[in-house]
Image: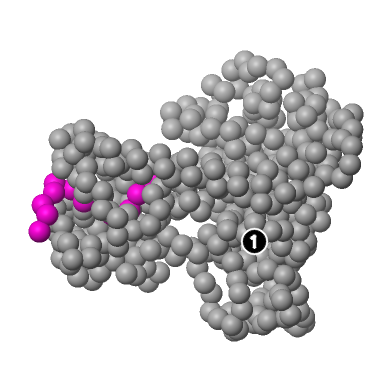
Amino acid sequence: MQQYDSIVIGTGQSGPSLARRLTDAGHTVAVIERKFFGGTCVNTGCTPTKTLVASAYAAHLARRATEFGVTIPGQIAVDMKAVKARKDYVLGLSRNGVEQSLKNLKGCTVYQGHGRFTGPKSVAIGDQTLEADQIFINVGGRALVPPIEGLDRVDYLTNSSMLDVDELPPHLVILGGSYIGLELAQIYRRFGSEVTVIELAPRLIAREDEDVSLAVADILRGEGIDIRVDTKVVGVARHGNGVAVDIIHDGVHSQIVGSHLLLAIGRRPNTDDLGLDMAGIVVDERGFIKVDDKLCTNVSGVWAMGDCNGRGAFTHTSYNDFEIIAANILDQGDRGVSDRITAYALYTDPPLGRVGMTEAEVRRSGKPALMATLAMANVSRAFEKGETLGFMKILVDKETKKFLGASFLGLSGDELVHSILDLIYAGAPYTVLQKAVHIHPTVSEFIPVLIGNLKELTDAIRAGPANSDSDRARA
């Protein structure tokens, strides 16, 4: 029996950072990792996929070169083996960095293997048992495999196995029209694949406002991606060297035949083989570990962080989970998940940056609100760069003048969103940003312009085609 002050199970975004804080505070820490260091983000999420996004963007821009007065002799080609090698290199540096930092961390002992609870204070790894008064679970999640007829008899890919592909799929069929599916759809379309996206809901990324959803669909269709919404998959079967997907849309049965099938319809937590029942740790009906606002489980001295607790499912929320726990345990703080403001991005090109409430949520709340929208085609920086797709939208509380939410679909939308996010955290009124003098030419300079066009939510005008209503439009 090995005794430690703390045990960290999993090395995603929360675990390693917490281990460092705990050892800095003098704790003896055991870190358990059963496979790859770095968790979902480093191995199958942000790091590899955004590396692929960069390669796909380079190919896309090369094909548009003549629009910028640049001539590239010959045909633009994508070397998939080289693309994968670059992705593996970037991923490998990140993974190795996490692993070496933990193995060299004074006061920390790393165990490589599958940890399972044997009690509320004990975890077994093979024939070893570790004990600690504090245990932190950071085991992440994996792709959800749906109960589709025939799926067990065909080859299919998930976001993880997709990263092992080093050849161009002739026709990639993607089940799921949300963040993972759409990013990979555009990536592989730009690499040269035919791509079909099948979504059960009436529109893509259904959690977003309808105008955002429809704009994203238009962007992807504009690149030649076949989008099928309000479509149910009723079965799959082998079809030569590929796969046939049986679908129903508007009561009509049809079939789509592709070379590769990618599942991107959701995620499930890696909690089913941790022995949580041996510790008495409660999970919900989907397997997510139930936690309170401080990320404590129902068992004293056990916390759950990251994707496995169902309270965020993003790299940044996982890291914030670490910050919450470290503040409360080590800094005598009083932080909670309820302090967190919803913010995330969809990394299609152009990206979508989102913060706070959607327009639909504001309308349902009944709050008196103001809204403004602006087409990216009116933004001079976007026009100069030839990146004019998308629009900006902000919503504010009419009475308090505080921001309620924003959607930035367009050039630098994933960075632009932080200007609103920071003011929401600061509790500052929109007038602070309205008076700010932003640098020209940037995308950010149009936020004060946008604020100047706020109107009653019921009267607000949608972002339309390029126009010159603003004195700054394309200035």
Residue 84: in sight, yes or no?
yes
Residue 115 in picture, x, y percent from top left:
26, 62
Residue shown at 15% from the left, 35% from the top: 26
Q: Quadrant of residue 200?
A: bottom right
- Magenta segment's dominant SS is strand
Name which residue type carries label 1: Gly
Residue shown at 68% from the left, 81% from the top: 238
Residue 224 in picture, x, y percent from top left:
81, 56
Residue 262 in picture, x, y percent from top left:
62, 66
Residue 203 in picture, x, y percent from top left:
68, 62
Q: What are the residue bounds of the magenta stretch?
A: 1-13
Residue shown at 22% from the left, 42% from the top: 108
Q: Quadrant of residue 288?
A: bottom left
Circle 1 — which element?
Answer: loop
User: Is residue 10 shown in magenta?
Assistant: yes
From the image, which quarter does the C terminus lie in? top right
Nearer the observer, 13 or 291: 13
User: Is residue 376 shown in magenta?
Assistant: no
Note whether 99 is above or below 132 in the view shown. Answer: above
Relative horizontal placement of residue 289, taking residue 456 as reference (left or right):
left
Residue shown at 54% from the left, 21% from the top: 432
Note whether 448 is above or below 353 in the view shown. Answer: above
Relative horizontal placement of residue 381, taking residue 179 as reference (left or right):
right
From the image, which quarter does the N terminus lie in? bottom left
Nearer the observer, 101 or 336: 101
Q: How is the image coloured?
A: one colour
Residue 342: in sight, yes or no?
no
Nearer the observer, 18 or 373: 18
Q: How many marks?
A: 1
* Residue pointed to by mark 1: 177
Q: Callout 1: few (<14), some (14-19), or many (20+) C-alpha neighbours within 10 Å?
A: many
